[in-house]
Amino acid sequence: MRFWLEMGLIALSDHWKWAVGAATVLLMVVIGTLFLGVLRSDTAEAGPAPSVILEPTAIPDQVSTPIPTSPPDVVSTRSPTAVPTLSPQAADPVVLASTVNVPIYLTGAKNVGSLEFVLTYDPTVLEVSEVEAGGLAQNSLFDFGVRVPGRLWAGLIDTDGINGDGPVAVVSFKVIGPGSSTSRLTLENVSTYDARSLLDILTDATSGNFTVDGPTLTSPVLAFPR
């Protein structure tokens, strides 16, 4: 303030123009001083501007990706299962399927107009494959059938009558049994009738036999008394 008072005294003593100029300068200085004071007071009240502290961001270390390893081979601890083998000595001998023809014989036939019989056999050894009329029954009506394995039914009719000796039927069997097997061949339920009188005729049946080994065969026989 002392500086400003001295400036005013100089202006008054020097000239009135200086006084006016000094007053103008003084007024501007006073206004500037007030304006600066207002600005400082506003700044002081507002307080210092908060400073933003940027914390350094930690850079993560390089993440290593684990390399997958191949799993170990699976080792089986199960003991191997023994496969049983069949000794050739323990097995039954196998015979390839073959066929045997068994004729049914008539002996002493005289004027036989009809004949019916049942031939029994072992179905574990033999299997019927075909039945045909024999030499004595070529002009006969012939029929057969197997309703139960092991029992063959056969029948014929001849209006002229059958006479003589010979096969009346031939049975073809498939051999299905082992080599040591045997089948008995038996004639059962035999019925015969005379072609003219239609009376029944007495007969005598003889059983046959078949053995796979060999093979050996004895044919069954149906005999007529003289």
Image (tube, grey):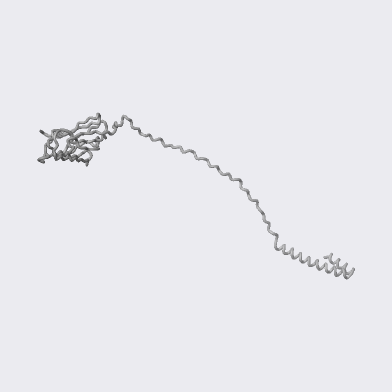
Q: Position of residue 96 (x, y in %)?
A: 29, 33
Which part of the image, by quadrant, shows the N terminus? bottom right
Q: Nearer the viewer, residue 209 or 161?
A: 161
Q: Is residue 22 left or right of residue 75?
A: right
The image quadrant that residue 31 belongs to is bottom right
- Counting the numbered discs, the total is 0
In this image, 102 relative to 50: left or right? left
In the picture, the quarter occupied by the C terminus is top left
Q: Residue at x 64, y 51 (%)?
A: 57
Most extreme residue toward the right is 14
Residue 193, x across and y down, in percent: 12, 39
* Position of residue 30 in the picture relative to residue 75 (left or right): right
Asked whether 203 or 50 is in front, the reply is 203
Q: Quadrant of residue 179?
A: top left
Placement of 21 over or under 107, stated as above or below: below
Residue 102 x, y percent position in the rendering: 21, 34
Q: Establish if 12 lies above or below 189.
A: below
Q: Quadrant of residue 104?
A: top left
Q: Position of residue 59 (x, y in %)?
A: 63, 48
Considering only vertical position in the picture, is 46 above or below 214? below
Q: Residue at x 21, y 31 (%)?
A: 217
Tell whether 82 sits left or right of 29: left
Q: Nearer the viewer, residue 106 or 59?
A: 106
Closer to us: 195 or 208: 195
